[in-house]
């Protein structure tokens, strides 16, 4: 018997509890930034965590457990978000940021929590997802395109628009208004 | 003239070797471009370093609790082929029996149809009340649809199958939450058992058996609850 070829033991309960402590807030924040909805973000984390638990045999130990779970929860958030709000290639979307959201929209944005999340709320779903995945989650453009079932060019255009829009909002983000 | 879009791709390591070398060379000889690039980096850093929303109170506890529950259900790998479907079936049957014995209070019924049509994921406490059997009818409708989807699941490709399972999970969770919120615990218990089985569908190679088992369970519960739902008077 070749003991060296044996698979490493999958992470157990204690490892998952520790991962929740270390990574839970980051998982939630990532899911919130993708879905823009607190309840959906919680559901995405719950779903991703459950999937990670059932796939724990696949964890190879090359990364930290919370990093591995993070990716799974982000995928859950993307799936959930697509079910609720299908992403469309809005290549011809207007560049301007909505200057004065309505009361309901403004309230929804404030309830999102942080100022960045409010700013993300002004982007289209496609722009928001591409920006979050590329600049906050560090995905490759090709990965994003595959995940969103679209062309790399569409991802690039959405990313460019999102970046431009968010940069114009930086003064407000800095001042906290 | 190198645009900010190109600088963004350069920063994100998304240019090919030749394009990247071109930008590098331009950055060294063009002060204005270098300034623009520094500004871009600074802006992106500020966006990335915005404070993170912590998970709501209770979320961590719920996740810990879920892992503890899963651990309690864990078993040696060799038993996986029969233990889980058997557990799900037993839980379902027990819960159906309990459900049929309970005296439903119409005031506690919820309009799950509305929940589903509006949004599969609902905020706790936002499920509307109704003095109608809408919840039962919504549940029957959900179970009929789900059973049909499960029967056809095997003919779908992997991506479609995962999407369908995720959709069923979201609906199942909405009904489970609605039932829990309003104290219809037996229904919630059945749906929790189904959720466990649904999650397991995507996890291993014994899908056919599990799908058949789950479709059977949905069918069994449907048979028992459908007459109750349809016999209730409908009131707007």
Image (spheres, coloured by chain):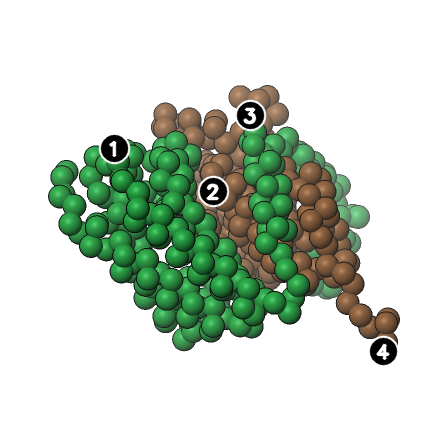
Q: In the rendered image, is residue A83 in sight?
A: no
Q: Which chain is brown?
A: A
Residue B217, horizontal then vertical, whole percent: 38, 62
- In terms of sequence position, does the residue under pointer 4 or pointer 2 come before the other? 4
The residue closer to the viewer here, B35 or A12, is A12
Is the residue marked by circle 3 packed among few (<14), some (14-19), or many (20+) residues within 10 Å? few
The Cα atoms of the two marked residues, 4 and 2, are separated by: 48 Å
- Mark nearest the camera among 4 and 2 is 4
Outermost residue to the bottom: A1
- Position above or below: B24 against B34: below
The Cα atoms of the two marked residues, 3 and 1, are separated by: 48 Å
Residue position marked by numbered label 4 in the rendering: A1
Pointer 1 chain: B
Q: Secondary structure at mark 4?
A: loop
Q: Which chain is green?
A: B
Tell me what residue is drawn at x 45 percent, y 44 percent. Answer: A124
The residue closer to the viewer here, A166 or B211, is B211
Residue position marked by numbered label 3 in the rendering: A172
- Position above or below: B128 against B77: above
């Amino acid at each position: 018997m070749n003991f060296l070829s044996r698979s490493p033991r999958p992470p157990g309960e204690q490892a998952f509890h520790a991962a929740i402590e270390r990574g839970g807030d980051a998982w939630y924040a990532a899911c919130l930034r993708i879905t823009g909805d607190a309840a959906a973000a919680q559901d995405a984390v719950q779903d991703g965590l459950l999937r990670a638990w059932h796939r724990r045999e696949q964890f190879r130990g090359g990364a930290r457990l919370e990093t591995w779970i993070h990716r799974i929860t982000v995928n859950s958030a993307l799936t959930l978000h697509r079910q609720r709000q299908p992403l469309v290639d809005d290549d011809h979307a207007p560049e301007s940021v909505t200057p004065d959201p309505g009361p309901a929209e403004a309230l929804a944005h404030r309830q999102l929590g942080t100022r960045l999340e409010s700013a993300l709320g002004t982007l289209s779903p496609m722009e928001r997802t591409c920006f979050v995945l590329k600049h906050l989650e560090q995905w490759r453009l090709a990965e994003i395109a595959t995940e969103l079932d679209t062309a790399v060019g569409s991802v690039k255009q959405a990313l460019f628009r999102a970046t431009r829009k968010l940069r114009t909002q930086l003064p407000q983000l800095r001042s906290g208004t | 003239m190198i645009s900010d879009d190109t600088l963004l791709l350069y920063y994100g390591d998304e240019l090919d070797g030749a394009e990247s070398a071109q930008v590098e060379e331009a950055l060294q000889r063009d002060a204005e471009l270098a300034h623009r690039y520094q500004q871009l980096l600074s802006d992106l850093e500020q966006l990335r370093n915005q404070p993170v929303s912590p998970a709501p109170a209770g979320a961590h506890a719920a996740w810990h609790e879920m892992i503890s529950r899963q651990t309690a259900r864990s078993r040696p790998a060799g038993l996986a082929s029969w233990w889980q479907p058997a557990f799900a079936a037993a839980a379902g049957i027990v819960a159906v029996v309990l459900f049929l014995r309970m005296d439903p209070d119409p005031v506690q019924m919820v309009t799950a149809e509305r929940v589903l049509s509006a949004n599969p994921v609902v905020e706790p406490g936002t499920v509307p009340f109704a003095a109608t059997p809408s919840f039962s009818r919504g549940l029957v409708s959900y179970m009929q649809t789900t059973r049909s989807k499960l029967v056809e699941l095997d003919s779908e490709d992997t991506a479609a199958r995962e999407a369908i399972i995720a959709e069923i999970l979201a609906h199942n969770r909405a009904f489970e939450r609605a039932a829990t919120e309003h104290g219809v615990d037996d229904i919630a218990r059945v749906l929790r058992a189904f959720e466990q089985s649904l999650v397991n569908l995507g996890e291993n190679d014994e899908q056919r058996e599990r799908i058949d088992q789950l479709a059977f369970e949905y069918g069994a519960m449907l048979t028992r609850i459908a007459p109750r739902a349809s016999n209730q008077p409908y009131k707007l």
